[in-house]
Image (spheres, rainbow, N blue to C red):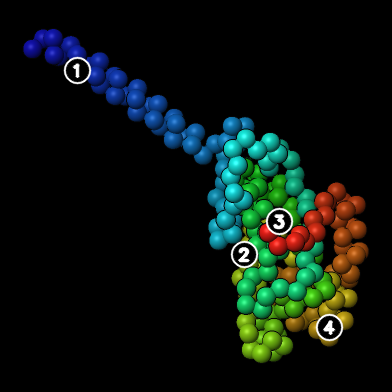
Amino acid sequence: MFAISQKLPRARCHARTTLSVVAALLALGGLWSNGTEAQQLPVPAAGLPGAVTGAQEVPDPGLTYKVVFNLSSAGSLDAVHPMLLRVAKYLNALAEYGVPPARRQLTIIVYGPATQFVLKDAVFAAHNHGKHNPNVAMIDTLRQAGVITRICSQALLAQHFEPHDVLPTVELDLWALSTRVNLELHGYVVEDELLPGK
């Protein structure tokens, strides 16, 4: 009986040690090898890029990501524009690798055939046989996550739209060219649209 009572404290100590190790591993589960914590995805519906073991270039939480995305192509009237989804996935990747919101400075410049995708739903429907604008929710979600969407006024004029036709979460600029040049001079990297599947 005495021998059994001597072993009990050791068993309890071993159990406490095991629990401590498990707790530490769980705490580290949300950390990357560089010690930064993965964050909640800003746009969960957009998902993440596919994970590849041994990838060398990944988002760096020590950098400030100043990126301007050009959105000018015509897209489907029934689905979110692929470029908006691409921006959302990139934003998610930055968050997943621990880049803090203050270092995610993303802007979308809309012009050309894509202009209609920043119109208020009623205006969009009036020009597209009653269809709803499938991009409204995504643009609003991106805005809440800190992504700024800007529309070229020259594109609005060319397509006979008015500033009040534009979604309230979208900012109005004089000209896509001047916006892009200004942002580049402020250190932004320009990301053009890619072919499908890229």
Depth check, front residue: 54 or 48: 54
Tag 3 and tag 1, C-beta contact below 8 Å: no
- Check if mark 3's residue and mark 2's residue have beta carbons within 8 Å: no
Residue 63 falls in which quadrant of the image?
A: top right
Is 2 located above or below residue 107 in the figure? above
Marks 2,1: beta carbons within 8 A: no
- Marks 4 and 2, how far apart at CA: 26 Å
| Residue at image mark 4 | 159
Residue beneath the point at 35% across and 22% down:
17
Q: Residue furthest top?
A: 3
Which residue has dot 2 on it? 141
Residue type at mark 2?
Answer: Thr
Mark 1: amino acid: Leu
Q: How many C-alpha atoms fall within 10 Å of the one at disc 4: few (<14), some, or many (≥20)?
A: few
Work out which quarter of the rendered image holds the C terminus and state it. Answer: bottom right
Q: Earlier in the sequence, mark 1 or mark 4?
A: 1
Earlier residue among tags 4 and 2: 2
Q: Helix, strand or loop at disc 2? A: helix
- Disc nearest the viewer among 4 and 2: 4
Q: Is residue 150 visible?
A: no
110 with respect to 52 (left or right): right
Q: Any mark on residue 198, and which?
A: 3
